[in-house]
Image (cartoon, rainbow, N blue to C red):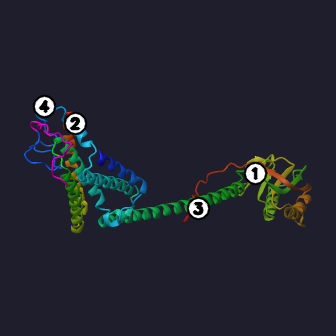
């Protein structure tokens, strides 16, 4: 490590720039910018304009000194270290972190995981609720619709179709009275009739039978013979019920009228009752939701 | 010129060899690199100031690296490694900036 002046350096160093660093003693090469600071003014215009680049060029000239070789070696190590560090930073995992950083990361992860856990639980509960709720709702809706259909048939507000019988009472002498017709209806209901129509009138639970000057009336509508009774139910059962000894057919025949019963697989009862709102009765609120 | 070539060669070798940093050195390598960079910029500035000395450069390079690593090591032992690393990086960064400013003034007069 020679201390003698570098042979390549100009024998007379260019005079230092006025106002720059003090040149009394050699500054270490890595010292900061000197008294004026990095951002300080440069001072008066530098007299030597050849200085910078010329010196760099001189210094860049290859020199076969030990110091230069050593500097080259250091630079090589530095380049290697930079590349290594950049590589390892790019591929950095957790292994290069300090213990405190690792603890912090672990804490963060734990907190986040517990947050996610609770969030997942909430979402699961919501999902279960939604599934149950929708299935409950669908079942309730289905049940309600079935009840509605049954009740509409019972109340006579919906047309009905199905197997049944057609009973025709020819009554040329107008001997058939309202009680006879009511008996016929009761017989049919006993035999399981679910929907009944007499001539153009749907007969329901609240239907009334009466008699006026023109003849029979059902729910205030006068009937004219022949009376055609349509009943949906089991055709065999109802047909047999009509024909039993002492039953409605025999009664009507004794009155001098004729009865004809025809079983039909596909009947349509199209007459409708208009529902009447009850004047006094009010529905009791159901204690539990319909199920 | 030769040291610059050495730097390039070292970069290329490091890029192609895929070296792994030993676990014990991992906290110190980045700080050491920055300290070495500071020494390099200081050397360039010294060249421009006309006061460059090979020996001073080598010694300042090595001492910079060793001191920086030592400070970080001490900080790790004291439990303030992260803060001290930040401090060292800040100080070295300021020095690099001031050196680069001086180099810029020499080369571009601006």
| Front position among marks 3 and 1 | 3
Q: Do dots 3 and 2 share one subunit?
A: yes
Label 4 vs 2, first from the N-terminus = 4
Residue A27 is left or right of residue A227, and the answer is left
> In whole angstroms, how far apart are the C-alphas of marks 3 and 2?
91 Å
Sequence-first disc among 3 and 4: 4
Q: Nearer the viewer, mark 2 or mark 1?
A: 2
Residue B29's quadrant in the figure?
A: bottom left
Magenta highlight range: A1-19
The answer to which image quadrant residue A142 occupies is: bottom right
Above-or-below relation of A44 to B55: above
- Find out whether residue A59 is within the magenta segment: no
**Which residue was labeled with disc 2?**
A54
Distance between the Cα atoms at labels 2 and 1? 120 Å
Q: Residue A89 appears at what percent x and percent y?
A: 37, 56
Mark 4, residue position: A47
Q: Name the residue under label 1.
A: A202
Task: Give the answer, above or below, for where B88 lies relative to A16.
Answer: below
Of labels 1 and 4, earlier in sequence is: 4
Q: Which chain carries label 2?
A: A
Q: Do the residues labelled 3 and 4 touch (CB within 8 Å)?
A: no
Percent from the top left, x then y, of residue A269? 79, 51
Q: Tag 1: Cα neighbours inside 10 Å, few (<14), some, or many (≥20)?
A: many
How packed is label 2: few (under 14 Cα within 10 Å), some, or many (20 or more)? few
Both marks 4 and 2 on one chain: yes
Q: Could you tell which of marks 3 and 2 lies nearer the N-terminus?
A: 2
* A121 relative to A142 in the view: left or right: left
Find disc 3 in the rendering and name its residue.
A136
**How far separated are the C-alphas under marks 3 and 4?**
95 Å
Q: Which residue lies furthest to the left in this view?
A: A24
Q: Name the secondary structure under disc 3.
A: helix
Q: Are marks 2 and 1 on the same chain?
A: yes
């Amino acid at each position: 490590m020679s201390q003698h002046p570098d042979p390549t350096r100009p024998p007379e160093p260019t005079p230092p720039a006025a106002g720059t660093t003090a040149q009394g003693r050699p500054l270490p090469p890595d010292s900061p910018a000197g008294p004026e600071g990095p951002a300080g003014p440069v001072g008066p215009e530098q007299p030597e304009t050849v200085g910078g680049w010329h010196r760099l060029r001189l210094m860049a000239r290859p020199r076969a000194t030990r110091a230069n070789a050593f500097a080259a070696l250091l630079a090589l190590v530095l380049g290697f270290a930079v590349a290594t560090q950049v590589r390892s930073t790019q591929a950095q995992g957790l292994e290069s972190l300090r213990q405190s950083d690792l603890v912090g990361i672990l804490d963060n992860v734990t907190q986040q995981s517990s947050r996610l856990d609770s969030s997942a639980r909430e979402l699961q509960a919501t999902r279960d609720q939604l599934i149950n709720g929708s299935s409950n709702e669908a079942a309730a809706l289905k049940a309600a619709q079935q009840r509605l259909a049954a009740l509409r048939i019972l109340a006579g507000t919906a047309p009905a179709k199905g197997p049944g019988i057609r009973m025709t009472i020819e009554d040329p002498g107008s001997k058939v009275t309202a009680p006879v017709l009511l008996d016929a209806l009761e017989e049919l209901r006993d035999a399981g009739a679910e929907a009944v129509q007499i001539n153009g009138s749907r007969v329901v639970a609240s239907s009334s039978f009466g008699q006026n000057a023109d003849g029979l009336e059902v729910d205030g509508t006068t009937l004219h013979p022949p009376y055609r009774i349509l009943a949906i139910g089991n055709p065999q059962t109802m047909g047999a019920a009509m024909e039993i000894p002492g039953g409605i057919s025999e009664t009507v025949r004794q009155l001098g009228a004729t009865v004809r019963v025809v079983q039909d697989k596909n009947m349509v009862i199209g007459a409708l009752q208009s529902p009447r709102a009850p004047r006094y009765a009010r529905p009791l609120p159901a204690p539990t939701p319909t199920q | 010129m030769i040291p610059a070539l050495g730097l390039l060669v070292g970069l290329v070798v490091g890029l192609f060899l895929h070296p792994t940093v030993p676990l014990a050195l991992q906290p110190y390598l980045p700080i050491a690199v920055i300290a070495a960079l500071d020494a390099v910029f200081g050397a360039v500035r010294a060249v421009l100031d006309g006061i460059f000395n090979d020996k001073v450069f080598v010694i300042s390079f090595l001492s910079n690296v060793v001191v920086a690593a030592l400070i970080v090591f001490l900080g790790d032992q004291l439990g303030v490694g992260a803060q001290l690393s930040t401090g060292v990086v800040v100080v070295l960064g300021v020095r690099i900036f001031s050196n680069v400013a001086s180099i810029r003034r020499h080369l571009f007069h601006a």
